[in-house]
Structures are given as C-alpha cells and as structure tokens.
Amino acid sequence: MSELLQGNRACVQAAIASGCRFFAGYPITPSSEIAESMARLLPEVGGVFMQMEDEMASLGAVLGASLAGSPAMTATSGPGFSLMQEHIGYAALAEIPCVVIDVMRGGPSTGLPTRPSQGDVMQARWGTHGDHPVVALVPASVPEIYELTSLAFALSERLRVPALVLYDEVVGHLREPVDLGTLRLSRAERRRPTVEPSAYRPYAPDADLVPPLADFGTGYRFHVTGLTHDEAGRPTEDPAVVGALHRRLQEKVARARDDVVSFAGIGLEDAEVVVVAYGIAARAAERAVTDARARGERLGLFRPRTLWPFPDVELRAVAERVHTIVVAEMNLGQVVLEVERIVAGRARVEACLRADGTALTPDDVAHAVASAAGALA
Amino acid sequence: MTGIEYRDRLRRQMLPHILCPGCGHGIVLKALLRAARSLELDWDRTVFVAGIGCSSRLVGYIDGCTLHTTHGRALTFATGMKLARPELTVIVITGDGDGLAIGGNHLIHAARRDVDLTCLLLNNETYGMTGGQAAPTAEPGAISTTTPGGARERSFDACALAVAAGASFVARGATSLPLELDGLIARGIAHRGFSFLEIASDCPEYFGRYNQLGRGPEMLQLQRRRLDEVDRTLRAKRSLGSRRAEGPPPLRTGVLHERPA
Ligand code: SF4
C-alpha cells in the first residue's frame, strides 16, 4: 500500500528495518527530521536515541555503540559532516561499522542551510586525512533513499567501513508516494569471530580481507586504536605492517566492488551523448533525456547510485560508444573531475553546473546538451 | 592491598611501555588495577576507553577490552557504548589536555548527563606526548615550550567544573597518596552515575625539567607538600619550596562531592 513519505523519514524507516538500534546526532538543517523520527521510533524497538553535544560526539557515540554490537548511525549536513571527518577516519582505520547520512546543503561554511547542493561529494571521498576506504551512496528519490540506506547498513556491517549516504536537501524533504512493501531491504550480519577468545586476533582478516569483529563485553578482550596497528591490534610503525594494512583496507572494498557499485541508465545502448548525473540533478537530467528521446534524439543518462567507489568500468564502456558526456551536478565541478579521469579522452567531457542554492532544471541540462552538440557541429 | 599480580592483568605483548622513568601515570595504572581487583570486576565486561596523550596510552597495557580513541573524545565513545550495552562497566582514562582542552565540552556534557561512567583525569599540567606544551591546568607562571616566559592564563579547577556540570561523584586523588587512590577509584567505579576523579600526576620529563622540579621522586615529594593538610602547616612555616612566582595552590584530596545519580 502506498503512503506519502518524506525522504528523511524514509531514511529512518529503512535504517530501523535494517537493524539500526542506535542513533546519536546533533540538530542541523536540513537533516533534523532524521533525528526527530529516530527519537520517537528507536525506543519502540528497544533501541537508543541520543542527542549529543556536537557532531564529533555524535559519531563518537555511534562508534562506541557499534563496538558494543549495535548497528548504529548518525545524520548531519555540511558543517556537521566537516566535523565528523575525524571520526570517519577513525572508523576507516579501526574498521568500525557505522552509517553517516549527509543531507547536503549549500556551502562552504554556514552557506545556505535550507537550500540544496551537491558540494560534499569530494569531501565524502577525501574529507578525512590519509588514505582510507569509504563507501558513498547517492539516492535520487524517496524510495531510493530507503533502499540505499538499507544497503549502507549491509555494506558497512559486512566490510567494516564507514558507509555514507549523501543526498541533497530537495531529495531529503521531498514527499513521494512509496510502497515500502515493494522495496528491497539489504541485510548483512556483521561477522563475529568463531575462534576461542584466546586465539582472537582482531585485525587478522578472513579470505575477503575483512577481519571478524567481536562485540565488547562478550568474552573477547582486545585493543582497538586509531594508531596504525598490527593484526593483534598493537600499535606499530613497522613499514611492512603499515603498508600491508593500508593496502588491505583499500583492497577489501575493491574486492567487494561488484556488490557495492551500482548505476541506472536510460538509452545507453544507442546514445550519442550521455548525461552523467546523481541525486536530484539526475531527476532533472532524466526529464531532459526522456524529452529528447521522445523527439528522436539519441541522448542517454548514466546515473551512479554509488559515488565511491565510482562505477568506472561501466562508464568507460559507455564512453567508448558516445562522442560526448555531459556531467550535470550542483557544485562548481567535482564529479566531473572523476569522470574526466575515467573517460581519459575516449569521449569529450562537458560540465553542466549550478551552485546557487537552487536545483538544476531539465532546461539547464537540455541547454548544456544542445551547446555541447553545437560545439561539435 | 598486597599480593596482586599486576602481570596477570597486563597485556604482556604490549610491553615495554612508553612511559618515561619516573612518570606518575604508572602509579595510577597500578592503583586502577588494585581497585578493579578489590571490586572483583568481571574483566570480560569491563571496558577501558581513552583519548590521546601519555595518560591515554595506559589502556593499551590493560588485558581487557580496551579502546584508544581520538583526541578529547573518549567520553563520547564511552557514552555510546554504555548506553548500547548497559551491563558493561566503562572506565575512561584521559589527561588534562585531552579532557579539559580539546575534550572539555564532552566532559561537561558527560557530567551533565550523569551516565554511569567512571572518568579518571590524570593531571600533570602539561602535554607530555607532544613535548611539554602548556595544558589548561598549568598554574600561572608554569614554564612550558609554549609559555617560555611562564603561563599567564588561569588554570582550570577540573573538580569544581565537574561538580558545576552535574557529575554525581567527584573526587581528587594524588600519585603521592597511591593507597588512598585505590579506594577513591573503587568508590568512583562503584558509584552509579558519572564519577569524575582528577588525579594529580607528574611529568618529570617535561614539566619537571622545564620548571626545575626534579625527577619523579622529587616531584612526588613536592606534590605531597601541596596536599591540603601538609600544605597548611608548611605555609604557616613559610617554607613551601617552589621556583614559580607563586607557590602552586594546595591540593585537596578525597571525595569532594557525592549525591545519588
Ligand atoms: S612525557 Fe611526561 S607524561 Fe609522558 S610519559 Fe614521559 S613523563 Fe610521563
């Protein structure tokens, strides 16, 4: 049965349905509905809601709860996302599952608290210091917020990585008819150790390069640190151990790539020009593409649902067949850099950008496509 | 308490430890292990959480569930963990910079929430790990690498802060009174609610050296003379020895505040 559901509320429903039992957060527009819904709904399922003193504390509490065995998440927006980078890095190195929702608003700084933007996409990839793995998903609709929030929990628990879900203010506040019963929930249990406590090495990986994680308080005594560590969890500066750890952290996500990476396409089989867009910008692009195709133009849409890791192989295959790729995004050019890197001259890459606190429109995309085609003619 | 085998509670593969000779923090670690034994804590259900700094490194040596977090934020991890799994006993070790500067906001909110955690704040008035910069507890006049002419700012009274913020158990201990320390820590752990213990410790490597206070033993003697009752006698005799402009204020130890959580 369909109901009218707001994006931020769909996020909460998906999280709880996927096993989330702990939320800690700090009020910030335009994500506050997530905390408010969590405050009402989590206690009903025996979960814990905490309003913390700031965003560092919020993600810290989430990581503490996660180590105690609770699937846990927080939600924020740009300024809070900046403050959370410290603990995103901690979660990446200490391999603590957590989900972070970033409802993007205009930045930098306080910027445009109530207006949409897609300005945090590179921060999601590189915001914390040092090399580190992240998974970042970018839903474009209310039902997709539901499915990708659920997927974020599954990937985070399975891979022991921070999983980020980024969507802009418009998608977060959008109300769309949703039939939750028809949507896909992902469920992945965290892998716990099967060895005796005395034989447990907290950072000794299984074949998939992910080490099993014991809950604190269940008889396994081990050390977790943000210092670079060996398989026993001991701090180390041994170059061989340090190098191997960093490579494993990257490689564990790379190996799971096919379960992580996804995208949606329209008209990719015959397109001559393809628009690459994600989040609300992809909704505008979709309209421009379907209108153009109705007129007989061979325009296509490539819509990543996973931004990090990026669907690079898939986009490269598209780039072999088209002459122009137009990247439409609501910032001054972030994902377009990644697209240029991936396409590497196989097709021309143009940008269709908007960074004024309003959403891209189908006309913006149509004009960008027309001028790209004009430049070619 | 006699007869405790510290080795049995230490993670021997982590040794040797990183503390300098004469560092006061080891005294606190031993007192903590004795307190845990006197309470017969279930070692599988006790978690030791720390931030960043010399004091925070102590948790790595304890053969328990140990979590070495980010600078200043140990209390936030501890709060989430305790609420997610209330049967855990959660003990936080922090330092003056960790707990009062970068983590000051988390400390006052942990006190205000009064969640059942025990927080040991080891105060040596300096940032030892980074080479002896001034901490927010450094007394006016204290020499450090960032206050070469002597600290000019007022110092924090961590216990008064914790009381004002709402902690339901507040005590001060000192490394020169190690046996009193056992009892204070045990009472803090047994207290239900947020227990805050400031423990006067010493950093001979930096604070002691820069302020010409001697090595570990001399610093302990000096600390002992600061203890309230001793101090009063000495002040009466006007014989309190210190090279700083004004002598350090007296240290009042013991339980300073307690109410049901
Ligand atoms: S630097 Fe100071 S506080 Fe750190 S271990 Fe050495 S003596 Fe102790």
Image (cartoon, helix red, strand yellow):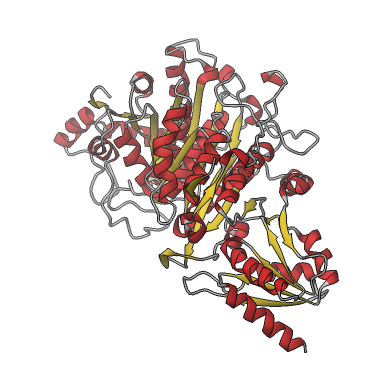
Depth check, front residue: B63 or A38? A38
Q: From the viewer's perspective, is A347 left or right of B196?
A: right
Residue B209 in sight from this viewpoint = no
* Residue positioned most to the left: B236
Which residue occupies 36% across, 18% down?
B190
A156 up-or-down from A112: above or below:
above
Q: Quadrant of residue A348?
A: bottom right
Q: Quadrant of the N terminus of chain A?
A: top right
At horizontal 26% and vertical 31% (from top left) the residue drawn is: B227
Asked where in the image residue A351 lies, by quadrant, the reply is bottom right
Look at the image and tell me in which quarter the C terminus of chain A lies.
Answer: bottom right
Q: Position of residue A235 (x, y in %)?
A: 64, 39
Question: Does residue A320 appear to the left or right of A374 in the view shown?
Answer: right
The image quadrant that residue B218 belongs to is top left
Question: Which residue shows up at 64% across the image and 37% down it?
Answer: A157
Q: Is residue A59 left or right of residue A162?
A: left
**B202 w.r.t. A276: above or below:** above
Q: Is residue A195 above or below residue A349?
A: above
The spot of residue B217 in percent (x, y) is 41, 33
**How far across and down, in percent of the image, does residue A16 sit?**
52, 36
Nearest the eye: A99 or B91: A99
Q: Position of residue B238 (x, y in %)?
A: 17, 39
| Count of labels in the image | 0
Residue B141 visible from this viewpoint: yes
Image point 42% across, 68% down: which residue? A111
Q: B95 or A135: which is nearer to us?
A: A135
